[in-house]
Image (cartoon, grey):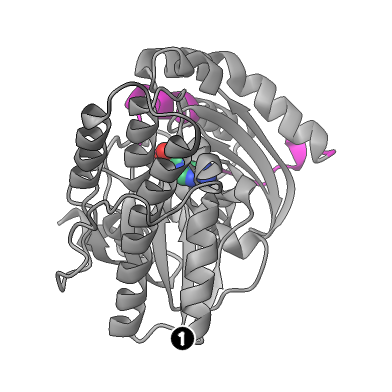
Amino acid sequence: MLLLAIESSCDETSAAVVRDGRQVLSNIIASQVDVHARYGGVVPELASRKHVEAISVVIDQALETAAIGLEAVEGIVVTRGPGLIGALLVGLSVAKAIAFARKLPLVGVHHIEGHILAPLLEEEVSFPYLALAVSGGHTHLYRVDGIGRYVLLGRTIDDAAGEAFDKVAKMLGLPYPGGILIDRLASGGNPEAIPFPRPLLHQKNLDFSFSGMKTAVLNYVKKQEGPIQGDHLHHLAASFQAAVVDVLCQKTLRAAEEQGLGRIVVAGGVACNSGLRTRLHALGGEKGLDIHFPSPVLCADNAAMLAVAGDCYLRAGISEPLDLNALASWPLDRAGREKWHPGEAKS
Ligand code: KG4
Ligand code: ZN
């Protein structure tokens, strides 16, 4: 089955053609980063407008790269939520229009569902597994028992890890989105130079907190005389990153142990972080765990990742009415239940 997938939940407009929910024929991503960088973060209204400008071009490119015409597409999968409501509506409206015009089945997928199933586009990962979804809006641990079968185990009680990376980068005068820049700076620094706190690390639950860590960096920066630069900047980036990575790794390993899971998937934009990749592979390797990170292009926002779930739902005969609404906030476990047990989730 050939699916056209469309993603527009935040600041990337993306369209992909995927065969049988596994083989990516194209995955076109138009980033709006340059537009938002001058404001230091995503401006929702601008994001919606840029999606409107880009969406048809991106879809055309996805079809062209896959060397197919629209008539070959057998179903449409789109991000229904969570995300910026205006941005989501652009992708959803186009998806509905194509589904209506071509009489194709349509299915709406949860953005994080896309992220945590993305490794299946590259390799076999059997269920159940533990998923750490770590992005600009999420830092959540899920038990994944199958497609649409997700159990929330822990989550951030304040900021997401990506948000903390971006805010710390901003404090240091780095452009948005700063996560990747902190990662680069960290590689030349000493991760033990500044002892930043590791919030909630020694609490038994599987929740995270990054707000205090961010404040600790702010207090440190304020105490310095003059700008932080040179080796000092590298040490600060390395120390902050080490604190985030430490908490993410320890909580993830604890969750795997508690749940008796031998496989871990890490997904979302922060899964690109080189410190997180190296440390989790090392710690997980020592425990004989099977660790999976998607390639960077499949970690960041992209449409291909939606096709894994989309293909499964459409094959099971699950499709959506054309009055489907977008959802700015939408718990993943509920989204999964809604698919397999529509009545139960509504109650
Ligand atoms: O999944 P994503 O592309 O969009 C959301 O759904 O949020 O994640 C974006 C987040 C941003 O906060 C960005 O700074 C962060 O992922 N990020 C990184 C790295 N690459 C992207 N954070 C740390 N290290 C990186 N290498
Ligand atoms: Zn994302």
As rendered, which of 264 and 203 lies closer to the eye? 203
Left or right, 319 with respect to 123, comes to left
Is there any visible trace of residue 113 in the rendered image?
yes
Instruction: For ligand 1, tell me if the residue under mark 1 lies within 8 Å.
Output: no
The reply to whether residue 78 is in sight is: no
Name the side, left or right, on which 100 lies relative to 28.
left
Quadrant in which the C terminus appears = bottom left
Three-letter amino acid code at the position of disc 1: Lys
Mark 1 surroundings within 10 Å by alpha-carbon count, few (fewer than 14), some (14 through 19), many (20 or more): few
- x, y percentage for residue 28? 68, 34
Q: Is residue 238 magenta?
A: no
Element at label 1: loop
- Residue 88 drawn in magenta: yes
Identity of the residue furthest to the right in this view:
67
**185 and 31: which is toward the camera:** 185
Q: Relative to 285, does residue 252 appear above or below in the rendering?
A: above
Residue for point 63% across, 58% down: 21
* Range of magenta residues: 67-92
Number of labels in the image equals: 1
Instruction: Name the residue that disc number 1 marks.
Output: 287
Q: Percent from the top left, x then y, of residue 37?
A: 47, 18
